[in-house]
């Protein structure tokens, strides 16, 4: 699912069938995206190249029950029909830095 800064798809194998990223992309994030320091609000997600319309990125993390996520992480958690996705512990899960998502968000179960 991830692409290089030149737009080529990542050539590495996915970590699992359900995870659309390889080990390196999970660790560092999609090379076409990057979290940078915002002058006033911590970090914010930017694109490192012009992304095509309909570009997909995964909001991934630990699937948890809402009550098990610490309060301070709730601002960055994604609510799904299966529970809450807590991406905070994962550096490469970059969509948590998305201010106002203009991309389609695909959430996936990674751990339970
Ligand atoms: Zn990759």
Image (tube, grey):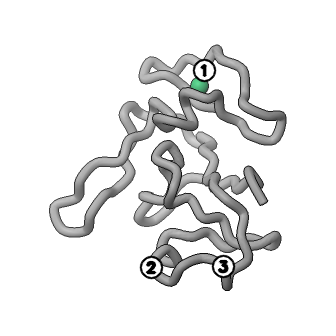
What whole-number distance in Å separates the C-alpha atoms at marks 1 and 2? 33 Å
Residue 51 in view here? no
Residue identifier under label 3: 68
- Which of discs 3 and 1 lies nearer the camera? The answer is 3
Q: Position of residue 83 (x, y in %)?
A: 76, 73
Q: Quadrant of residue 86?
A: bottom right
Whole-percent x, y for residue 92 in the image: 50, 43
Q: Residue 89 location, x and y as percent?
A: 51, 56
Q: Would you say the residues marked 3 and 1 are in contact, meaning their CB atoms lie under 8 Å apart?
A: no
Q: Position of residue 34 (x, y in %)?
A: 38, 41
Label 3 residue near ligand 1, CB within 8 Å: no
**Crowding at mark 1 (Cα within 10 Å: few <14, some 14-19, many 20+):** some
Above or below: residue 86 compared with residue 55 = below
Residue at the spot 28% in from the left edge and 48% down from the top edge: 36
Is the CB of the residue bearing disc 1 within 8 angstroms of ligand 1? yes
Q: Secondary structure at mark 1?
A: loop
Reply above or below: 106 against 19: below
In the image, residue 13 above or below residue 32: above
Q: Residue at x 61, y 53 (%)?
A: 59
What residue is shown with label 1?
10
Numbered label attached to residue 72: 2
Which is more N-terminal, label 2 or label 1?
1
Of labels 1 and 2, the one closer to you: 2
Nearest the viewer among 29 and 67 is 67
For the residue labelled by badge 3, is the local secondary structure a helix, a strand or a loop? helix
Q: Dot 2 lies on which element?
A: helix
Q: Quadrant of residue 16?
A: top right
Task: Give the CA distance from mark 2 to mark 3.
Answer: 12 Å
Q: Earlier in the sequence, mark 3 or mark 1?
A: 1
**Residue 77 appears in the rendering:** yes
Question: Around disc 2, counting alpha carbons within 10 Å, would you say few (fewer than 14), some (14 to 19), or many (20 or more)?
Answer: few
């Amino acid at each position: 699912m991830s692409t290089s800064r030149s737009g080529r798809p990542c050539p590495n194998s996915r970590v699992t069938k359900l995870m659309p990223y390889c080990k390196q992309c999970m660790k560092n994030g999609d090379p076409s995206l990057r979290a940078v320091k915002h002058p006033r609000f911590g970090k914010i997600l930017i694109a490192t190249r012009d992304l095509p319309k309909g570009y997909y990125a995964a909001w991934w993390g630990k699937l948890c029950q809402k009550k098990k996520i610490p309060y301070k992480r709730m601002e960055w958690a994604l609510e799904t029909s299966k529970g809450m996705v807590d991406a905070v512990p994962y550096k490469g899960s970059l969509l948590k830095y998305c201010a106002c998502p203009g991309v389609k968000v695909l959430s996936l179960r990674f751990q339970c």
